[in-house]
Amino acid sequence: MVHLPQRSEALVLRRTNYGESDIILTLFTATYGLQKGFAKSARKSRKRFGAVLEPFTQAVFQWKKGRGSFWLLQEAELVTLRFGLRSDLQRLALASYGVELVGLLLQEGEPQQLIYELLCSFLDYLEQGGDEFSARLLFELRLIYLLGYMPHLLHCSECLKIFANELIRFDANRGGSLCLDCAGSGGISVDLGTIGSLARSLKVAHRQFSGFSFGPKTLHQAGLILSQVLQQILPREPRSLKFLSQL
Ligand SMILES: [Zn+2]
């Protein structure tokens, strides 16, 4: 059976050298989700692919169906290299973390238009020198939301009481926010203001990263909340997280 070449824009998540001169890429596309791409002899000749086989690069790939689920990559046209990410270790670590989260949380071959746009916008914002702390908060929050794992925020996840102006706690294992009566000594203490900030941030378009300003307390508490949720849904701890927390 002859397969005609197809074209897809994709973001390179990961690059692995294979054999003497081949490269295997983990690609992320809007229409086909995560895919593995095989670039034959790509380390010998740079003619066909140029510099597009590096992580964070976006390009339009021409590919044919290979054996199994692999795409046989034919050639590529560069969209953006995001070279600026490599000039700052903190940004590079955060970009690597974002890419690894997507790789860990998505199923291969599942279309994910909104998450594709989210990840590309996150990387663009980091490359342009945007605020790293709010970028991480917004990226984690939206990823959790778009994957359908959003915990209860503005009401108690057990008695469903809507919070007015009170102390609350958060426990991802019990569904999210909890009133003090339900929480007992479980979960972590959080301010209603933090929860409100998270809920409001979800009302902004998923591609927008600029124009947010979170105080240190909100960033700290939101970080605890989101990492609790991520720990619940990730198959393992991201390798990039250790590096990121050392910086
Ligand atoms: Zn309650």
Image: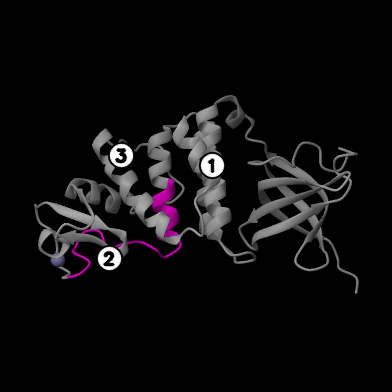
* Label 2 crowd bin: few (<14), some (14–19), many (20+), radius 10 Å: some
What type is the residue that disc 2 sits on?
Arg
> Residue drawn at (14%, 60%), measured in percent from left and top?
184
Residue 94, above or below 191: above
Residue found farthest to the top: 87
In the picture, the disc for residue 174 is: 2
Colouring scheme, one of rainbow, by chain, secondary structure, one colour: one colour
* Label 3 crowd bin: few (<14), some (14–19), many (20+), radius 10 Å: some
Q: Look at the image and tell me whether residue 125 can be seen.
A: no
> Residue drawn at (56%, 48%), measured in percent from left and top?
100
User: What is the x, y in percent for residue 23?
Assistant: 80, 47
Residue 236, above or below 194: below
User: What is the x, y in percent for residue 183?
Assistant: 16, 61
Q: Nearer the viewer, residue 112 or 156?
A: 156
Q: Secondary structure at mark 3?
A: helix
Q: Is mark 3 within 8 Å of ligand 1?
A: no
Question: What residue would you read off at disc 1?
Answer: 240
Residue 88, above or below 108: above
What type is the residue that disc 3 sits on?
Leu
> Residue drawn at (86%, 37%), measured in percent from left and top?
46
What type is the residue that disc 1 sits on?
Ser
Which secondary structure is most common in the magenta stretch?
Answer: loop
Q: CA distance from mark 3 to mark 1?
A: 20 Å
Query: Which range is magenta?
Result: 139-158
> In the displayed structure, does residue 102 sit left or right of residue 80?
left
Residues at circles 3 and 1 in contact by the CB criterion of under 8 Å: no
Question: What residue would you read off at disc 3?
Answer: 219
The first of marks 3 and 2 along the sequence is 2
User: What is the x, y in percent for residue 1?
Assistant: 90, 74
